[in-house]
Image (spheres, grey):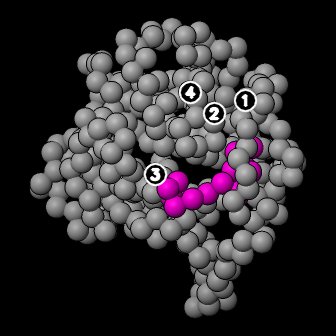
Amino acid sequence: MFDIIERIKYKEGLRIKFGGYVLSLERNRNEKDFPKILKQWYKKRTGKNLNLENPKTFNEKIQWLKLYDNSPLKTKLADKYLVREWIEEQIGSEYLIPLLGAWNNFDEIDFDKLPEKFVLKANHGSHWNIIVKDKSKLDKSKAKKKFDKWMARDYAFKAGLELQYKGIKPKIIAEKFIEDTNGELNDYKIMCFNGEPKFVWVDCGRYSNHTKNIYDLDWNLQPFKMTYPISKTPIARPENLDKMIELAKILCKDFAFVRVDFYNVDGKIYFGEMTFTSMSGTDKFEPEKYDLELGNMLTLPEKKG
């Protein structure tokens, strides 16, 4: 008799337990199969066929870059811990969010030494973080379960072969909790094509009413959406927008595409992250023609692998 069925996604694939029997389905990591795997995943996520042989749209070109434009530098910059060293070298440590600690596993964390507010992050993935606004209310048992699960996974194989994450040594880091005087934290993401900043998108209300406004470098609101609705409340042009664009231009110069993310806290600029496969290349454009228009702006490099 099958007394229990549990499905657990591990870094090695899927384990299905039937009572005392365990069936382990290994995840396919044979690189020659990656194009086929990626095409199947893209079709499932978007309903569209993926043209890897002659990509045209922005989303298609992001898929191509996943497979054929990886490097040790990209992997280092995808690592939320190691990227700090590179940012310090490129633009200076004053743009880094203060680091409160780094650990190899959750059990190493001494919470008594952390402030009342902080952010815990896994360095080797995306959205693997816990925002702590009141340490006394943190459910450590629940947090440990999350981080133990995250630390056992290879994010490169989680959602669409974002291979820049492959090989990152997992760590947990704690950063200072930051917000502006209104209790908000607007996220300014600068989209850079072939070494040139082109657009700034602003994420607001990411954990409540998520909106995404896209502007050109002169702060003109663009006539298209990418997955999320446009904010009904106008967003003022940051006074130091030119500085953020200047910094993004320094950081993006060696990449065909990268999104350079900043936080702007009452005029103080903080580096967020370098994002090479934005939304894993599945952003929903409205009108759809802008997927092709942005694709035309992106010149693919020579194939690396």
Q: Which mark is residue 258?
A: none
Residue 10 vs residue 1: left or right?
Answer: left
Q: Residue at x 60, y 24 (%)?
A: 198
Q: Earlier in the sequence, mark 4 or mark 1?
A: 4
Q: Please say whether residue 204 is visible from this viewpoint.
A: no
Q: Amino acid at mark 2?
A: Phe
Q: In the rendered structure, which disc, 1 or 3, sits on the residue that comes first in sequence?
A: 3
Label 1 element class? loop
Specify the label residue 297 is tagged with: 1
Residue 178, given in percent of the width and then of the height, sits at 28, 33
Tell me how far mark 1 sits from mark 3, CA to CA.
23 Å
**Residue 78 seen in the current view:** yes
* Residue 226: percent from left, percent from top: 67, 28
CA separation in Å, label 3 and label 2: 17 Å
Does residue 86 sit above or below 239 in this rendering?
A: below
Counting residues from the N terminus, which is met first, the one under dot 3 or under dot 2? 3
- Whole-number angstrom distance, CA of label 1 to CA of label 2: 7 Å
Residue 213 lies, in percent from the top left, at 57, 20
Cα distance in 3D space between marks 4 and 2: 6 Å
